[in-house]
C-alpha cells in the first residue's frame, strides 16, 4: 500500500475529505505535540497548543501554495502560535527556576556503565535542557527547538519565522550563551547549599 503525499492529502482535504484531513493530522501530530511540549514545558499546555496549531493550519490550508514543503509551512504556523502562546503566559523568573533544576551527575562514576543508569542520566539531562529553555524568551526558545529538535537549517528557520538568517544565528548563539550562564549559576548555587 502506498503512502499518500502531503500534497495529495491537502488537495483532498480542501475538497472536503475529512479522512484526508485526519490522515494529515495523524502524520504530524506527534511532531507537533513534541514541539509544543518543548516550547511550553507542560503536557496540558502542549495539548492545547497543538489543537490551536492544527486549527490554524486548517483555517490557512487554502493559502498553502506548495512553494515550500508542507512540514516547513506547518512549522511556520506552529512556531508563530507557540511564540504567541508563550507571550500571553507569564514567563517564570530565572531566580525561581534555578532552585528547581534537578541534580545532575557528571558521568565520572563507575556505576554509569549500567544502561539503566545511563538512561536516567539522559532523562535528567533532557529535563535540565527543557528547564533551561523555559528561561529564554519565546523567540529564542523557538529557534533552539527548531534547530536542535526539528533539525531545520538556519535558512529554513529564517523562512519560517520571517526574519533574516543572521538574526536567527545571533539569537541561536545568544540563547546557548544564556543557557550556559543559567546552568553555571545553578551549579554554583547548588554547590553552596
Image (cartoon, rainbow, N blue to C red):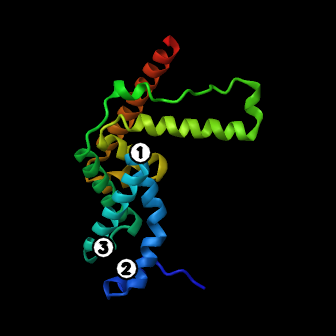
Residue 51 percent coordinates (x, y): 35, 64
Judged left or right of residue 135, residue 85 is left
Q: Is residue 26 above or below residue 41?
A: below
* Callouts 3 and 2 close, C-beta under 8 Å: no
Residue at x 35%, y 58% (from the top left corner): 48
Residue at x 37%, y 55% (from the top left corner): 156
Q: Is residue 56 above or below residue 102?
A: below
SS label for mark 3:
helix
Residue 180 percent coordinates (x, y): 44, 27
Front: mark 3 or 2: 3
**Outermost residue to the front:** 44
Q: CA distance from mark 3 to mark 2?
A: 10 Å
Q: Which quadrant of the figure has residue 19?
A: bottom left
Q: Nearer the viewer, residue 75 or 162?
A: 75
Quarter of the figure that contains the N terminus: bottom right
**Outermost residue to the top:** 192
| Disc sitting over residue 58 in the figure | 3
Q: Which residue is mark 2?
A: 10
SS label for mark 2:
helix
| Disc sitting over residue 41 in the figure | 1
Judged left or right of residue 51, residue 192 is right
* Callouts 1 and 2 close, C-beta under 8 Å: no
Amino acid at each position: 500500500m502506498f503512502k499518500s503525499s502531503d500534497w495529495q492529502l491537502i488537495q483532498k482535504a480542501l475538497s472536503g475529505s475529512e479522512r484526508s484531513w485526519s490522515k494529515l493530522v495523524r502524520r504530524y501530530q506527534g511532531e507537533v505535540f513534541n514541539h509544543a511540549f518543548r516550547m511550553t514545558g507542560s503536557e496540558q499546555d502542549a495539548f492545547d497548543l497543538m489543537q490551536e496549531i492544527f486549527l490554524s493550519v486548517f483555517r490557512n490550508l487554502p493559502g498553502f501554495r506548495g512553494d515550500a514543503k508542507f512540514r516547513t509551512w506547518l512549522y511556520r504556523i506552529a512556531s508563530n502560535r507557540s511564540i504567541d502562546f508563550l507571550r500571553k503566559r507569564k514567563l517564570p523568573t530565572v531566580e525561581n527556576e534555578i532552585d528547581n533544576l534537578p541534580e545532575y551527575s557528571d558521568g565520572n562514576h563507575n556505576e554509569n556503565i549500567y544502561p539503566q543508569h545511563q538512561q536516567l542520566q539522559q532523562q535528567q539531562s533532557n529535563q535540565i535542557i527543557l528547564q533551561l529553555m523555559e528561561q529564554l524568551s519565546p523567540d529564542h526558545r523557538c529557534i533552539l527547538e527548531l534547530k536542535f529538535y526539528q533539525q531545520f537549517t538556519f535558512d529554513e528557520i529564517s523562512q519560517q519565522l520571517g526574519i533574516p538568517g543572521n538574526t536567527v544565528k545571533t539569537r541561536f548563539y545568544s540563547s546557548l550563551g544564556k543557557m550556559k550562564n543559567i546552568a553555571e549559576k545553578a551549579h554554583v548555587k547548588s554547590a553552596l547549599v
